[in-house]
Image: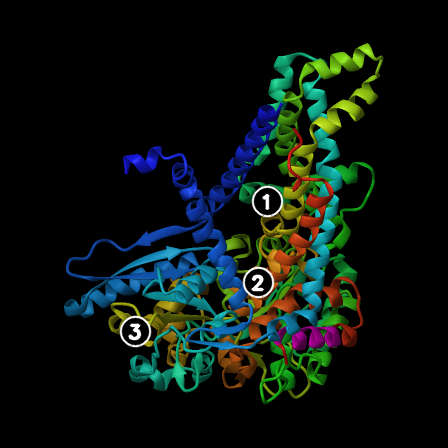
Amino acid sequence: MRRMLYSPKVAPYIFVLPFVLTLAIFWVSPLIKSFIMSTQDIIPGSVTNVGLANFERLIGDRLFYVALGNSMKYMIFTLFLLIPIPLLLAVLINSKLGSDRIKAVFKSVMFIPALTSVVVAGIVFRLIFSESPTALMNQIVGAFGIEPVKWLKNSETGFMALLTVASWRWTGVNILYFLAGLQAIPNDYYEAADLDGANAWQKFWHVTVPQIKPTLVFVVTISVYGGLAMFLESFMLWGGNNSPQNIGLTIVGYLYRQGIEKNDLGYASAVGVVLLIIVLAINIPQLIATGTFKKEER
Amino acid sequence: MKLKKFATAALAAGMATLALTACNTATPDAETTAEGSMITQEAVEGATELELWTFVELHAQFYTEMAEIWNEENPDKKVQIAVNVLPYDDMHNKLQIALTSGQGAPDISDIEAGKFPQFTQGTPALMDLTEAAAPYRDDIVEARLDLFSKDDALYGLDFHVGATVAFYNTELLEAAGIDYTTIKTWDDYQEAGAEYFEKTGKYLGTVDTSAAWQEGLLLAQLGGEYFTEDGKVNVNSPEMIEALTILKGLQDANAAAVPPGGQPDTEEAFGAYNNGDFAAAVMPFWFTSRYLAYMPDFAEKIAIAPPPTVENPVNISVGGGGTGTAVMKDGENAELAAEFIAWAKLGTEGNISTWELLGFDPLNTEVWADQEITHNPENKFVKYFQNNPFEPLLEIQDSIGHLESFTNGSMPSVNNLLNTQTLNDIFENDVPIEDALNQAQSDLQNELGE
């Protein structure tokens, strides 16, 4: 035992064993199970193999495309909102502008939404965007003489509400990612740039951005996945999984509806498999293009 | 340099896990502790403990009170009920997961009628209650047992008939010079509504986008169904088109509008009713309990009447909604649980309590005719409503229909699509009725793989 622990060949494997086991038990085995279940028709007490029938159903299922479209749209919009804005804010916080104490408060305040329960936040946002004339948003637009809006019943306004929740919730988290990246950039680079006479924009574009590329890649990767796998925000904003005209239906929402609400786990697994394929189809080319898989240069 | 990069990545990854676990763990806790609640009967010596799940807090009170009476009558097989009250969606989803995984299910559970068919798919995990129900069966409205039956096995016992009736706010209507007793047909209803709107600028009735109570009623009156005889989806049938044409007519004549919340039985709609924005509701009988709980100011102002009908209706009314109480067959005390539930829900005492405590129209129609019970001046429902609630019920007693569709395993899908998509299309976005229904038909055929 002792010899094994001290052996440079075996010890590393023992150290990574807990992680490998967790991965195998909680990730890989459900993944394989999902693939198997996606080819089955599962009703309590009987499981039949149906081959690719679930996928054929999926191809003809209009609501699945609605869900797919919503998730895609959400993912793209969150990429546009939740990468540039937090990056800018992080650069501001990291700069020499303003007092450190105020910036520390700002940083914590921005992070609070990530710590609150989405359940509570969802209810608050639902009330803010309620259709009654006394709801906050309707009072705000009312001040400009606009009639009360049924925010959560129209596709555009409902989507706006969803993006508001997302921005509110994730801006702070992304700021922290970027801050961590920014603080790892050695000051020497900026000093060298100053000596060369670079202006603020040039420093940002030629020093900051290349240096935080690993962080950027990481944030984009999880944002793509997070956007496509979004469920809870929509579930909470509409007080359930069934928004009017399915304007808030996402892929995972559809998976939940079929698997849990309608007890069709085979079909739901097929939805899950398709989601996995889509996420990989976006993330892998993106990671290859940004050079993540290349060996690190020395 | 390399070390720094590594540190950055590690930090970022660390924070990511932190953020993810924070949001993952926070959610279920908040739900179960904030919204669920446990109601346990006082400790009974030598009793068998039975766990029960429900989504209506009032039901919990009913079960614990019934358990006390049962224990007095059956000292040799006492029960102690622990009721877990959970939100509607949560409860059904949790039960589904517990039954699928074979772990953590209660002994007894309430299952709402709209969700019931999916629990009887395949080999149901629910116990056949035919035997337990046998002693009471003769006096019970059979259609309400059929609703929870499949292949000659009875899986759930209901609380009520849920006959759809009309509720009118007589104070508001009288102020506008409208006499609700003259409203017999949907045409009358539309005319009265238009007149009411002209005089007050407010609406008489509702057209709903998140529930299909009125569609169910109209289908029963027109003799239609959501499915063909061999169980295939048929939501663009002539009856369905006619039903929605009638409702759309109400909306076009300003006799009805979409209420906040999309249907009367929502918190938002109770607010609108309390504001006097709507003067009538065509809802199942159990809506009585909502008046008492959420609209106390209208005491003695609400009258109950038979629902508006089409010309020569097949049935005047229909049973709407319902809650089947089911016993899990793998439960340790399934036999005792079944005996208790059958007694509580079908026996005379239970049926009287159902009315007195919950304000439902009980399954045992003997109770309907018992003046001592129905006209008890101390009863809070008798006190609240302007006329005696059983008057309209007795009037339509022989014409309360039942849709076969409600027992079809695909009914949850139909409900889901109507209440999210189709009714919104028709009443909010003015999509032509036939187009919306054809779309629904093809969506459902695809989804169900027909």
The numbered mark 1 sits on a residue in which chain?
A
The foreground one among B2 and B256 is: B2
Q: In this image, B374 relative to B75: left or right?
A: right
Nearer the observer: mark 2 or 3; the answer is 2
- Respond whether the residues carrying marks 2 and 3 are from the same subunit: no
The foreground one among A36 and A98 is: A36
Q: In this image, B65 relative to A64: left or right?
A: left
Quadrant of the snapshot with the C terminus of chain A: top right
Amino acid beneath label 2: Arg
How many circles with numbers are drawn on the protein? 3
Is residue A176 in sight in this rendering? yes
Q: Residues within 10 Å of mark 3 (few under 14, many from 20)?
A: many
* Residue B409: % across, % down: 53, 77
Compared with A245, A136 (above or below) is above
Residue that appears at 53% across and 82% down: B402
Q: Residues within 10 Å of mark 2 (few under 14, many from 20)?
A: many
* Residue A134: % across, % down: 69, 42
The foreground one among B194 and A172 is: A172
Tag 3 residue: B338
Q: Which mark is residue A257?
A: 2
Residue that appears at 33% across and 71% down: B350
Q: Residues within 10 Å of mark 1 (few under 14, many from 20)?
A: many
Real-space CA distance between mark 2 and mark 3, rounded to the nearest whole angstrom? 31 Å
Real-space CA distance between mark 1 and mark 3, rounded to the nearest whole angstrom? 40 Å
Q: Which mark is residue A122?
A: 1
- Respond whether the residues carrying marks 1 and 2 are from the same subunit: yes
Is residue B384 in sight in this rendering? no
Amino acid beneath label 1: Gly
SS class, disc 2: helix
- Respond whether the residues carrying marks 1 and 3 are from the same subunit: no
Determine the main secondary structure of the stretch shown in magenta: helix
